[in-house]
Image (cartoon, rainbow, N blue to C red):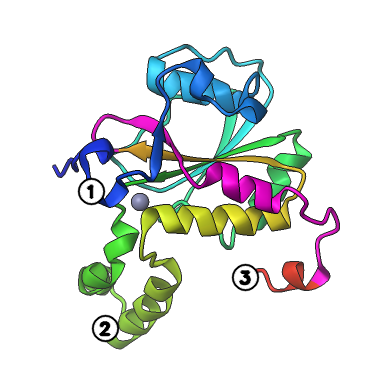
Amino acid sequence: MNIPTPVRLDEKYRNLLLEVNSQQDIPTGWQGTPIESIIMAQNFGWPIQASGGPELLIATCIEFRYALPVPRMYAYVIRRASGRVIGSEFSVGYTLAQGVKFLAMIGHNDCGMSKVHDKAPDVVNAFVEQGWRREVAEEYVRKHAARHAISDELQALRDEYIRLRNIFPKLVIAPLFVCLHDCRFYIPRWYQDVEKSVTNVELFVPDELVSNLP
Ligand SMILES: [Zn+2]
């Protein structure tokens, strides 16, 4: 099994991630919220006390090397390749209707979607083995690999964070980054700056933003 280099030793992430070594390292806007709870559970093993109602929406990758630290009766979870929720905005809306006010977006290092084009032939073969005609499988994979591909995990998280802030301006969204080596959360260094820049986002979402959703 492939366990990647810890992000704190990986040149790729040098100066791009902030460690969370204590409760004080958590941004004030997240303190006392379910986002703080999931960070403390992930990094320090603090147990999460489920109230019985849904408190949090978690969006993360399908990645099998990462398991969520949450009990049942606590969180809705959207797991999709790369962790982006493009095409699942209705699911987000559904959870809001159930009372959710917080979204934890969890990116990770060594994401398969950053090399999806290399893996495309294997994916085509997997469909062919299921009985798909090869040309049809190739066309399908070409279309969806392009849609799922990311060039950089942290950049993709940033882009998706900004996109979701604009579509769901009243939702508290926390971009987090999990290191697959030790399964600890980090906070992207860009978070505070990006948060400031989108904080005055219009509370009326432009119609075209909604009609252009996939
Ligand atoms: Zn992934």
How far apart marks 3 and 2 lie (CA) works out to 26 Å
Q: Earlier in the sequence, mark 3 or mark 2?
A: 2
Which circle marks residue 85 in the picture? none
Q: SS at mark 2? A: helix
**Cβ atoms at labels 1 and 2 below 8 Å apart:** no
Give the labeled residue for mark 3: 214
How far apart marks 3 and 1 lie (CA) works out to 35 Å
The region drawn magenta spans 180-207
Instruction: Point out the frontmost of discs 3 and 2.
Output: 3
Give the labeled residue for mark 1: 11
Residue 214, horizontal then vertical, whole percent: 62, 70
Q: What residue type is labelled 1?
A: Glu
Q: From what the image shows, is residue 154 above or below residue 100? A: below
Give the labeled residue for mark 2: 134
Quadrant containing the N terminus in the rendered view: top left
Q: Which amino acid does label 2 sit on?
A: Arg
Q: Which residue lies furthest to the right in this view?
A: 204
Q: Which amino acid does label 3 sit on?
A: Pro
Residue visible at 48% across and 25% down?
39
Queried whether the magenta region covers residue 203, the answer comes back as yes
* Closer to us: 214 or 102: 102
Residue 47, horizontal then vertical, whole percent: 48, 12
Instruction: Point out the frontmost of discs 3 and 1.
Output: 1
* Closer to us: 88 or 209: 209
Q: From what the image shows, is residue 9 above or below residue 198? A: above
Q: Which of marks 3 and 1 is nearer the N terminus?
A: 1
Q: Earlier in the sequence, mark 1 or mark 2?
A: 1
Residue visible at 55% across and 57% down?
160
How far apart marks 1 and 2 lie (CA) works out to 40 Å
